[in-house]
Image: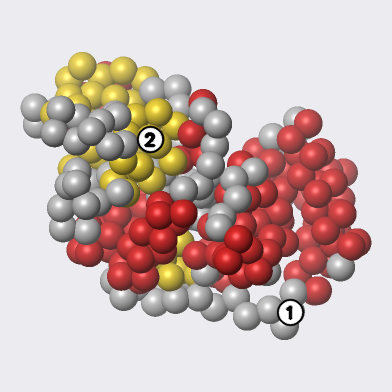
Amino acid sequence: MNLTADQLAEITNANDIHPLILGESIQKFTGKYKEQKVIFRIYPDNDYYQNRFEREGMALKAIAKVVKKRHTDEQLIIIPEIIDEWTSVEAGCSIRALSWIHGQAFSSMKPYLDFQLVIELIEIMKKASKHIPAKFSFEQDVVKKLTQPLNKEQENEEKWGMYLELITEFLDQQKKTKLAGTHLIHGDFHEGNILQVYPTAKEQEAKYAIIDWEFATKGSIYFDLAYAKEYSKVHPPLHLQREVNTWKGFAIATLAHWYVINERNSNNADLWLKKLEYFVKKI
């Protein structure tokens, strides 16, 4: 069930609410809340990906403990702040209001990953990691999901059958891979979730915002970089390539799973299935 602007206004007491057609995973609105512009992110209770509302909150709260100042000259990366949260049993969803960040996604520009941006992001992840509860892990939140269909009906679909055969073989090949990681990771790190923030009157240099933390968990930051490399064709610095390449297969597997689940009849699903097949057979 999708929320209407009127329902959201009644729950949050916000005004000037408008739907935001941005991204594919959850419903979003812009609005004015407590005299400031915010983005509302709506998470359904019957969430296939499980705990996305909790995972995003966990990540943002952990980062807030280590990033004390916003929009300073020294700070390259900006992370959204949690303004307020609601749970509506009647509407069957959880709602989070986040600070509005004015910028342009790299998906609408020529994407790249600046060396200093990568370094600062890794440092933030390292510092925030000590605030992540032990129950979050890459193996629990990502790997176990790779073999689960959307519903019983999908189990009988031909494309799911093709995917399941490949992912089973891939995971069998990766049995000896050490999945444990100590970093907070974003989980959906690509050019659509990286914004170049417009300079203000006080700040002449561009900043960068990392948004949409709903797939965050604890793992290896190199998975994030591998994901960005495979999905967005953005290349981390050369000295990180070896570590990034060790996570290439899991990045491809995660993307294949997303498209087979959410866009099973699209060219994207076929593309990532072929990439997964090539990776599995090449090994």
In the displayed image of the protein, which residue is found farthest to the bottom? 176
To which quarter of the image does residue 168 belong? bottom right
* Disc marking residue 129: none
Q: Nearer the viewer, residue 96 or 130?
A: 130
Q: Left or right: where does residue 186 sit relative to residue 276?
A: left
Amino acid at pointer 2: Gln
Which type of secondary structure does the marked residue at label 1 adopt? loop
Above or below, 30 against 98 in this view is above
Q: Is residue 143 left or right of residue 180?
A: right
Q: Amino acid at mark 1?
A: Lys
Give the labeled residue for mark 2. 196
Query: Mark 1 packing: few (<14 Cα in 10 Å), some, or many (20+)?
Result: few
Q: Is residue 25 left or right of residue 148?
A: left
Residue drawn at x 64%, y 43% is 233
User: Can you give x and y, in whole percent of width and height, for residue 124 in the image?
Assistant: 33, 62
* Labels 2 & 1 near each other (Cβ < 8 A): no
Work out which residue is located at the far left of the displayed protein and give it.
Answer: 35
Which x, y percent locates residue 251? 65, 56
Image vertical order of residue 243 relative to residue 154, above or below: below
Q: Is residue 42 visible?
A: no
- Identify the residue position indicated by label 1 in the image: 175
At mark 2, the secondary structure is strand
Please identify the quarter of the rendering in which residue 43 is found: top left
Residue 260 lies, in percent from the top left, at 73, 43
User: Residue at horizontal 54%, vertical 78%?
Assistant: 180
Q: Position of residue 235 (x, y in %)?
A: 60, 50
Name the residue rendered at 55%, 31% in the picture: 110
> From the viewer's perspective, is the residue at label 2 or at label 1 nearer?
2
